């Protein structure tokens, strides 16, 4: 679109004298033609929009002078220019509104203010957050989704009827043993891949998406952002990062994509690292909560250790990575009672999207495992990982879980579910496996998005750090727990 195509609305918002002077100087220095007006380009430059900076740098011979104007203007304010410009726009909008809108007392406004207060003040907001996590994640997703629903669908339907029927059908109709193994029995597409997707993962992500949609439509998430802002600033982020990080509990791949909404490159890299390292996806989280729910001490140890790693790695990343501290401002929408129809529609839509994404991965993983089994590669990897499993204090068959985790985190979590149900793990071994698997490498889909969003150097650096770090954490945790003689 050329500049001439854009209609002139005859409206120009006036900023303060310093910004107007900078805009005029930048407009005079711009020579190339852009899709937007020179004033808009100048405004985006002052706000240090990365794409516009990159485009102007490549097209303008006067870019050093333009950058000097941006830098000298920035030095005249204590706050980031993006915040200053947004604040002046808001003040102007409020001025216009005050001329045409008359405020009238709203019924229930006092109640809304009281609710706002208790959700964003640490003294009341933190206990409220813990209550939401207890009932929303632990009781609803962990015990009901990963416990009751999975036990019924996986234990009764699949193990009791569907898998035996498929095994018998395949055994009677297909004469080739290798093809039988591809479709059914221990590692078959139907008896392993689809069973994991339908019987273990889908009930868990369904309950998580239901709880998340409820919080999302209630207006609680922006208040959570305000509540955690001070803590997040210690790890190089701000309260706005609570949105992608919370989304990470649904799907880290989607959350990595959403992290592009963070203001600076430094924030986006730190958020991507923390998502890949210490934020379990909904299926993984649900399986962990379901397995650990019967052992409260193990659950507390797992959650405490992962939170510690999250804060420690975030804090060190903020210290190591150069850049300014993040600014934070967010307009609070009103709290409201969610509509059931909207919540159900969002939940079903997300479940459909998630299911369509994981099924091809689970089928492909089953085929690769089948190929690995018949060629001997799968068993060779399991045997080769035995020393590492020994260092973690785990039985050798635990290597299978981590091998599954290479394909997808939820696939590895489903493998952990099978391993624990077989009685192969003690309390300490369960916690060590859960911690190591939580911190394990990002799944294939998340890594692909990391490559796209952050570039191959950053993506490889993050994956290269996480892989040994996850096992190191597991080894250290096993040493600490066994030295203390805890049984969990």
Image (tube, rainbow, N blue to C red):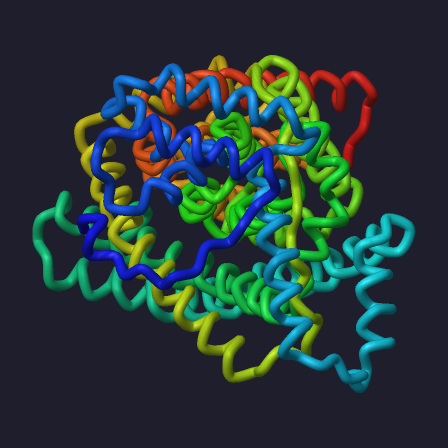
Taking the image as shown, residue 234 lies to the left or right of residue 402, namely right
* Residue found at the far right of this picture: 123
Taking the image as shown, residue 431 lies to the left or right of residue 209, namely right
Residue ID at (23%, 49%):
3
Q: Position of residue 434 (x, y in %)?
A: 59, 36
Q: Quick check: 478 above or below 26? A: above
Q: Position of residue 382 (x, y in %)?
A: 37, 24
Residue ID at (49%, 25%):
70
Residue ID at (34%, 20%):
63
Residue in front for this viewpoint, 214 or 411: 214
Residue in front for this viewpoint, 104 or 28: 28
Give the total number of marks visible in the rendering. Answer: 0
Residue in front for this viewpoint, 75 or 473: 75
Q: Quick check: 388 above or below 45? A: above
Q: Quick check: 169 above or below 63? A: below
Q: Quick check: 354 above or below 487? A: below
* Residue found at the far left of this picture: 175
Placement of the C terminus among the 4 image quadrants: top right
Q: Position of residue 129 (x, y in %)?
A: 77, 55
Taking the image as shown, residue 155 lies to the left or right of residue 328, namely left
In this view of the protein, can residue 412 be seen by the observer?
Answer: no
Residue 61 is drawn in which quadrant? top left
In this view of the protein, can residue 94 be seen by the observer?
Answer: yes
Residue ID at (87%, 76%):
110
């Amino acid at each position: 679109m050329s500049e001439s195509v854009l209609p002139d609305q005859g409206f120009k918002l006036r900023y303060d004298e310093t910004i107007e002077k900078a805009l005029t100087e930048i407009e005079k220095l711009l020579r190339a033609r852009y899709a937007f007006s020179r004033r808009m380009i100048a405004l985006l430059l002052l706000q240090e929009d990365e794409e516009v900076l990159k485009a102007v740098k490549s097209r303008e011979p006067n870019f050093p002078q333009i950058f000097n104007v941006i830098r000298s203007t920035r030095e005249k304010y204590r706050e980031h220019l993006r915040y200053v410009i947004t604040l002046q726009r808001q003040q102007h909008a409020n001025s216009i509104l005050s001329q045409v809108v008359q405020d009238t007392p709203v019924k229930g406004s006092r109640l809304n203010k009281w609710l706002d207060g208790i959700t964003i003040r640490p003294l009341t907001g933190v206990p409220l957050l813990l209550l939401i996590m207890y009932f929303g994640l632990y009781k609803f997703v962990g015990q009901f989704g990963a416990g009751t629903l999975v036990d019924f669908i996986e234990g009764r339907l699949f193990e009791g009827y569907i898998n035996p029927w498929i095994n018998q059908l395949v055994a009677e109709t297909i004469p080739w043993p290798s093809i039988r193994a591809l479709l059914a029995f221990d590692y078959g597409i139907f008896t392993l891949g689809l069973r994991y997707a339908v019987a273990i993962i889908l009930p868990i992500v369904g309950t998580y998406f239901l709880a998340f949609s409820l919080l999302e439509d209630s207006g609680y998430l922006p208040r959570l952002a305000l509540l955690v802002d001070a803590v997040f600033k210690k790890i190089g982020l701000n309260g706005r990062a609570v949105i992608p990080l919370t989304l990470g509990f649904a799907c880290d791949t989607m959350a990595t994509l959403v992290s592009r909404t963070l203001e600076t490159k430094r924030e986006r890299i730190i958020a991507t690292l923390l998502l890949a390292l210490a934020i379990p996806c909904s299926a993984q989280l649900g399986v962990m909560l379901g397995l650990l729910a019967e052992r409260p001490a193990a659950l507390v140890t797992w959650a405490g250790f992962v939170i510690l790693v999250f804060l420690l790695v975030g804090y060190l990343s903020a210290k190591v990575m150069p850049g300014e501290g993040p600014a934070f401002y967010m307009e609070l929408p009103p709290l409201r009672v969610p509509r059931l129809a909207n919540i159900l529609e969002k939940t079903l839509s997300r479940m459909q999207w998630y299911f369509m994404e994981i099924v091809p991965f689970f089928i492909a993983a089953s085929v690769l495992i089948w190929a690995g089994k018949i060629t001997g590669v799968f068993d060779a990897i399991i045997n080769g990982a035995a020393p590492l499993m020994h260092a973690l204090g785990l039985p050798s068959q635990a290597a299978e879980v981590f091998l599954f985790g290479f394909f997808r985190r939820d696939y590895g979590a489903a493998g952990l579910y099978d391993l624990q149900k077989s009685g192969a793990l003690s309390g300490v071994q369960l916690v060590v496996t859960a911690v190591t698997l939580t911190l394990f490498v990002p799944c294939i889909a998340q890594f692909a998005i990391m490559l796209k969003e952050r570039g191959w150097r950053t993506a490889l650096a993050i994956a290269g750090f996480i892989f040994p770090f996850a096992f190191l954490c597991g080894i250290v945790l096993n040493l600490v727990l066994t030295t203390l003689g805890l049984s969990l």
